[in-house]
């Protein structure tokens, strides 16, 4: 029995920990309304009234979103970026036209028309095998449900005034609802759906709210007001904890809080080793939000431009791209911004671009290979980037480079674009540095040959590991074979870094390894002085850098070169 307040049964639930930290609090169970909309038709003659009803609903939705924006002032760049996406969906021309056509020509009532049209887009986007694209379906659902609620005459669910120490337990928390949460009041979030790439997870990390997603039946198994402990690191939710588990988690929480407070002291410092050696700290970004962490970094090591394409309903125009790139460069000020050209294809599809199915998409027409085929798309991006270059310190980087031929081909396209701009009298910076991602073993193996062809390179350890170990980076079933701490990885990194340092060319790392403190010492010891990562990790890495000297790091790197297995390396690095 679960209803006796004094002797409630303890229950441990598991999910995916997506935002670190431990929280204690009381459950507030929130079940989002599931709208079931049947096809309903009206008698011909009232078309204008029904179109007006749909337009009014959109207007109300816009007013609601503006209200959310005003709450978000000074709160979160991520929240604002997500709500921007919602507004662009609300005013998407294709959706507008399809809904209006359904009302006018098929005499479908507005709620049915909205449901029908949004469901088409949700199924296209949601079916993508790329979790990043599939997660965009959550935004479409969010906007659809807002419109359906308004069309039913219901007011919005208000999660903005929850009591202190609330742990929000939801079945399908919408990103816009999460954006409304009062930061200081919500101690943690537990949700039945979602994964680490969900917008909800991105928001939660931005807010630093411990969060566990994918907890099956959470809203059924947890009752309102029940005492909970949430472990956002290990993905554990304890319902009605007993004393022993409560005190174990109190210890874990105080350790985590101490560690975070210590790390935060490094937020605005430079990356310095104990002996004063400088390590430049970069951030990875995906859009033009106002403050992704520019103030606490030295450079933007990776601007993943594919998000711009993925958040759009069609290929972004040159002007749209130019506006975004210019804004990023202006916001970054005198800090260099490394714009990576489109990395799409393989498992990352664009819903509006039908690419042929491939047996091995990661080994297929991805990134540069696709750009060479879609030359107009590639040139449009390069034009937009070059035109924006006069507004800041731009660097251009090509992904998925597998040979010197690839580099030369990409550079020749860039030269052709420069010539067009010259002919048009369009200004750009002629000295934009040109670099490559080193993430394919065939280019890693000839780092000493390719170095003379480029101005800089950045190592993409996420892909380098999948290609080096022949292990799909997204397949959890074969996780044990994805060995980013393997001897092969460190030997490969060693030869790349040695070649670039010998040639006096900048070499950085922008894969996830840069954000892992266990790797920091060996990376520095191998000769890396530029580490670029998600901005939530910069303080942690700066703190790690301050713990050792260059001599310590070089000793560790030399020792790692002779260890034979990943297990040996991890054990060794954990001990030094
Ligand atoms: C990488 O492969 O390490 C990288 C940084 O690029 P992405 O994760 O976008 O493929
Ligand atoms: Mg990559």
Image (tube, rainbow, N blue to C red):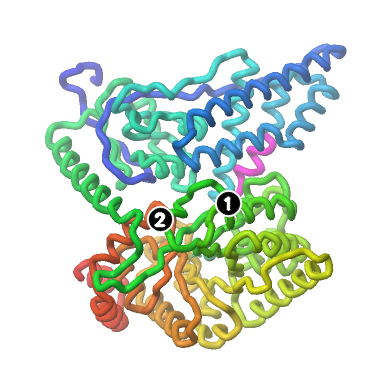
Q: Residue 61 in the image: x percent, y percent?
A: 62, 24
Circle 1 residues within 10 Å: few <14, some 14–19, many ≥20: few
On whether residue 190 falls in the magenta region, the answer is no
- Cα distance between the residues tagged 1 and 2: 35 Å
Regarding residue 421, the answer to whether it shows in the image is yes
* The C terminus sits in image quarter: bottom left
Q: Position of residue 283 (x, y in %)?
A: 46, 59
The picture quadrant where one finds residue 529 is bottom left
SS for dot 2: helix
Q: Residue at the spot x=26%, y=40% of the render? A: 22
Task: Judge depth for marks 1 and 2 and give the one in front.
Answer: 2
- Read off the residue under disc 1: 129
Which residue position holds label 2?
A: 296
| Mark earlier in primary sequence (1, 2) | 1
Other residues around mark 2 within 10 Å, as few (<14) / some (14–19) / many (≥20): some
Q: What stretch is highlighted in magenta?
A: 119-130
Q: Main secondary structure of the magenta part?
A: helix
In the image: residue 75, left or right of residue 419:
left
Label 1 SS: loop
* Residue 173 in view here: no
Q: Is residue 133 above or below residue 182?
A: below
* Residue at figure coordinates x 63%, y 34% from the top left: 87
């Amino acid at each position: 029995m679960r209803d006796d307040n004094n002797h409630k049964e303890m229950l441990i639930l598991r999910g995916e920990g997506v935002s670190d930290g431990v929280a204690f609090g009381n459950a507030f169970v929130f079940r989002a309304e599931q709208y079931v909309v049947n096809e309903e038709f009206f008698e011909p003659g009232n078309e204008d009234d029904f179109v007006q009803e749909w337009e009014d609903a959109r207007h109300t939705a816009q007013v609601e979103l503006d209200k959310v924006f005003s709450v978000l002032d000074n709160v979160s760049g991520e929240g604002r970026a997500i709500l921007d996406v919602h507004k662009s969906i609300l005013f998407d021309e294709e959706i507008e036209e399809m809904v209006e056509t359904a009302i006018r020509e098929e005499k479908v009532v507005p709620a049915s028309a909205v449901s029908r049209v949004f469901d088409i887009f949700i199924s296209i986007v949601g079916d993508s095998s790329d979790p990043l694209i599939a997660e965009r379906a959550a935004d479409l659902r969010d906007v659809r449900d807002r419109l359906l609620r308004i069309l039913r005459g219901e007011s919005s669910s208000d999660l903005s005034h929850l009591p202190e120490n609330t742990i929000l337990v939801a079945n399908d928390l919408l990103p816009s609802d999460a954006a409304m949460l009062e930061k200081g009041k919500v101690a943690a979030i537990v949700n039945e759906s979602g994964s680490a790439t969900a917008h909800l997870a991105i928001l939660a990390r931005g807010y630093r709210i411990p969060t566990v997603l994918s907890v099956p039946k959470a809203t059924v198994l947890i009752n309102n007001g029940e005492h909970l402990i949430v472990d956002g690191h290990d993905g554990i939710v304890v319902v009605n904890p007993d004393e022993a588990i409560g005190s174990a988690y109190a210890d874990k929480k105080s350790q985590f809080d101490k560690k975070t407070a210590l790390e935060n002291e490094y937020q605005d410092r430079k990356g310095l080793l104990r002996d004063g050696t400088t390590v430049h700290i970069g951030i990875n970004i995906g859009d033009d939000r106002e403050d992704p962490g520019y103030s606490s970094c030295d450079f933007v090591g990776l601007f993943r431009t594919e998000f711009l394409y993925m958040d759009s309903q069609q290929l972004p125009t040159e002007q749209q791209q130019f506006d975004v790139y210019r804004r990023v460069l202006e916001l970054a000020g005198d800090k260099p911004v490394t714009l990576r050209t489109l990395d799409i294809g393989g498992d990352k599809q664009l819903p509006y671009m039908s690419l042929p199915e491939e047996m091995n998409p990661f080994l297929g027409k991805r990134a540069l290979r696709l750009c060479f085929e879609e030359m107009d798309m590639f040139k449009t991006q390069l034009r937009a980037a070059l035109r924006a270059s006069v507004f800041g310190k731009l660097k251009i980087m090509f992904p998925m480079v597998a040979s010197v031929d690839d580099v030369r081909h990409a550079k020749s396209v860039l030269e052709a674009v420069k010539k067009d701009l010259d002919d048009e009298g369009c200004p750009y910076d002629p000295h934009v540095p040109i670099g490559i991602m080193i993430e394919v073993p065939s280019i890693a193996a000839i780092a000493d040959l390719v170095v003379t062809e480029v101005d800089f390179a950045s190592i993409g350890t996420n892909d380098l590991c999948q290609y080096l170990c022949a292990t799909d980076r997204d397949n959890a079933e074969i996780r044990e074979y994805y060995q980013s701490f393997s001897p092969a990885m460190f030997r490969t990194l060693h030869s790349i870094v040695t070649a670039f340092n010998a040639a006096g060319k900048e070499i950085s790392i922008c894969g996830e390894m840069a954000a892992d403190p266990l790797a920091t010492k060996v990376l520095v010891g191998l000769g890396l002085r530029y580490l670029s990562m998600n901005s939530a990790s910069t303080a942690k890495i700066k703190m790690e850098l301050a713990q050792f000297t260059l001599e310590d790091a070089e000793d560790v790197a030399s020792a790692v070169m002779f260890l034979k297995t990943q297990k040996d390396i991890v054990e060794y690095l954990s001990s030094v």
